[in-house]
């Protein structure tokens, strides 16, 4: 949890320097179909608290735990908001039940994300 906050702070501080007029796509793969599900929701809300530049696409695929009200995997495009309690980013799709522990699922998300959100710079973050 502390490491996640440090990464978010570092990204917030250095992202303007990294963007430098370039288009970026950052894919965040969240395998949260486990005891970390509530942390995933909190971290998505923390991403929404950041200012998102027009040159930046932050796309999250999160696999929620079946013990939560939302139990399927979803893809969303992060947008800025100031509500720390509710995820308000644009839902791209509900992709149903997935095996987020499979490298094939990760590969499919990366291929889909970088194809649908082309950019000059790319990053893939694996969370969990």
Image (spheres, rainbow, N blue to C red):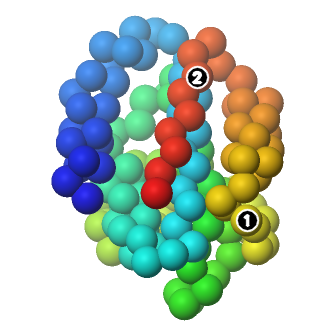
Judged left or right of residue 10, residue 32 is right
Q: Position of residue 117 (x, y in %)?
A: 70, 31
Say if 26 sits above or below 128 in the image.
above
Q: Is residue 92 left or right of residue 20?
A: right
Viewer can see residue 54: yes
Residue annotated with mark 2: 122
Above or below, 82 relative to 72: above
Of residues 69 and 3, the one drawn nearer to the viewer in this rendering: 3
Foreground tag (1 vs 2): 1
Within the image, what quadrant is residue 98 found in? bottom right
**Residue tagged 1:** 99
Q: Earlier in the sequence, mark 1 or mark 2?
A: 1
Which residue is drawn at the image coordinates 36% and 68% (left, top)?
39
Q: Secondary structure at mark 2?
A: strand
Residue 122 in percent (x, y) is at: 58, 22
Tally of numbered tags: 2
Q: Quadrant of the N terminus?
A: bottom left
From the top left corner, tell me how far across and down residue 82 is, in percent. 29, 59
Nearest the eye: 76 or 127: 127
Question: Looking at the image, which residue is at 42% across and 16% down?
Answer: 19
Q: Residues within 10 Å of mark 1 (few under 14, many from 20)?
A: few
């Amino acid at each position: 949890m502390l490491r996640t906050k440090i990464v978010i702070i570092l990204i917030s501080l250095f992202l303007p320097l990294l963007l430098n007029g370039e288009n970026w796509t950052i894919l965040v793969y969240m395998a949260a179909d486990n005891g970390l599900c509530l942390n995933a929701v909190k971290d998505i809300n923390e991403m929404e608290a950041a200012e998102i530049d027009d040159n930046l696409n932050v796309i999250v695929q999160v696999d929620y735990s079946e013990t939560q009200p939302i139990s399927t995997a979803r893809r969303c495009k992060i947008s800025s908001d100031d509500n720390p309690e509710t995820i308000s980013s644009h839902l791209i799709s509900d992709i149903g039940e997935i095996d987020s522990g499979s490298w094939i699922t990760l590969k499919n998300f990366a291929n889909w994300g970088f194809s649908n959100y082309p950019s000059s710079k790319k990053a893939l973050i694996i969370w969990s």
